Amino acid sequence: MDLWQLKIFCKVVELQSFSKAGEAVHLSQPTISSHIKDLEVHFGTRLIDRLARQAQPTKAGELLYAHACRLMALRDETESAMAQFVGKVRGRLTVGGSTIPGAYVLPRVIGDFARSYPGVRVALRVGDTADVLAGIGDGHIELGIVGAHAEEKRFQQVPILEDEMCLVVPPRHRWTAHDAVAMQALSAEPFILRESGSGTLKALARMLEGEGYRLADLNVVAEMGSTEAVRQAIKSGVGVSVLSAMAVAEDLEAGTLKRLTVGSKPFKRNFYLTRHRQRTMSPLCKAFAVFVGDRWKVAAVKNWV
């Protein structure tokens, strides 16, 4: 067993495919299969099940994947530490972003960071807030930006950016003649929810509580696993929803969706830069955190480093 084989194994698990893993690491599918077989012989157990067109880890494979990810993270941290020792910022950093910051905030930040530090490679993992926090918790992700406050004390967070939430309806909806809708009217309208674990859902719950309502008071007709799915469902007339203004900015400009306010004033939430409180940040992670803090003039981030 070596780190290269573990990297290949992780790619197979993450991409659920031997062929896609081969493309990612520039190896043929038979070579990928050979490396996985060597690992299975080494550990004396099957690690990957080939189900139809997908490769899925067995229970043993899931256990190995968790440990392998930590080893990959330690490898990246080692490279970053040695680069810093010789006066360079370089290496590989894995950051996470919940749906909105992962799609609309982090790509631009990562691009600017990479231009400032050419020897750096940043991998972005996008999921809902719960996914990103879980990744930070188990060490797969070193730093993340999420759209909800973490209740667990093992996470350290700093608010870095404000996001406005708005009611989104199709362009021919009867409410488009108005700028705001009363909460009582919204509670009777067919409503599309984000899935459990998303920061958008948590923000919506807080907004409703501020108006004296609960999620259970909504007329929920569908639950979607992504913001994109919610956007398309609204356009198709399935219902209305509350989404980040960032996520619908292009639709609003094109007139394919309409935004309104619920109640008397706009509802805003924070995006939080998030790390594990007990884990030591790698030099590269520190550099990225400071870069993010400087971008939005959040001095508190420098207390981390």
Image (spheres, helix red, strand yellow):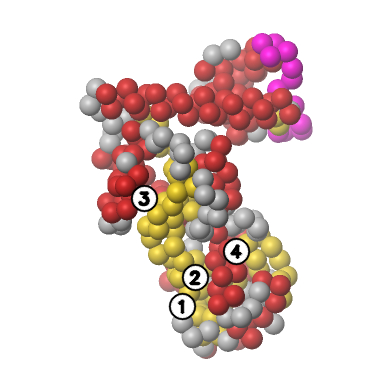
Which residue is the site of mark 4? 201
Q: Secondary structure at mark 4?
A: helix
Quadrant assignment for the C terminus: top left
- In the image, what residue occupies the spot 28% across and 40% down? 115
- Badges 2 and 3: C-beta atoms under 8 Å apart? no
Q: Hey, what amino acid is under mark 3?
A: Arg
Residue beneath disc 2: 165
- The local crowd at label 2, few if under 14, some if 14 to 19, many if 20 or more residues have their Cα within 10 Å, is many
Residue 53 within the magenta-colored segment of the rendering? yes
Q: Residue at x 32, y 29 (%)?
A: 90
- Separation of disc 4 and disc 3 at Cα? 25 Å
Instruction: Tell me the distance, in whole angstroms, between the alpha carbons under discs 1 and 3.
Output: 26 Å
* Closer mark to the observer between disc 4 and disc 3: 4
Give the label on residue 266, or none.
1
- Tag 3 residue: 108
Assign a secondary structure to mark 3: helix
**For marks 2 and 4 on the same chain, the one whose residue lies earlier in the sequence:** 2
Residue at screen point 64% across, 78% down = 213
SS type, badge 2: strand
Question: Would you say the residues marked 2 and 1 are in contact, meaning their CB atoms lie under 8 Å apart?
Answer: yes
The extreme left residue here reads: 87
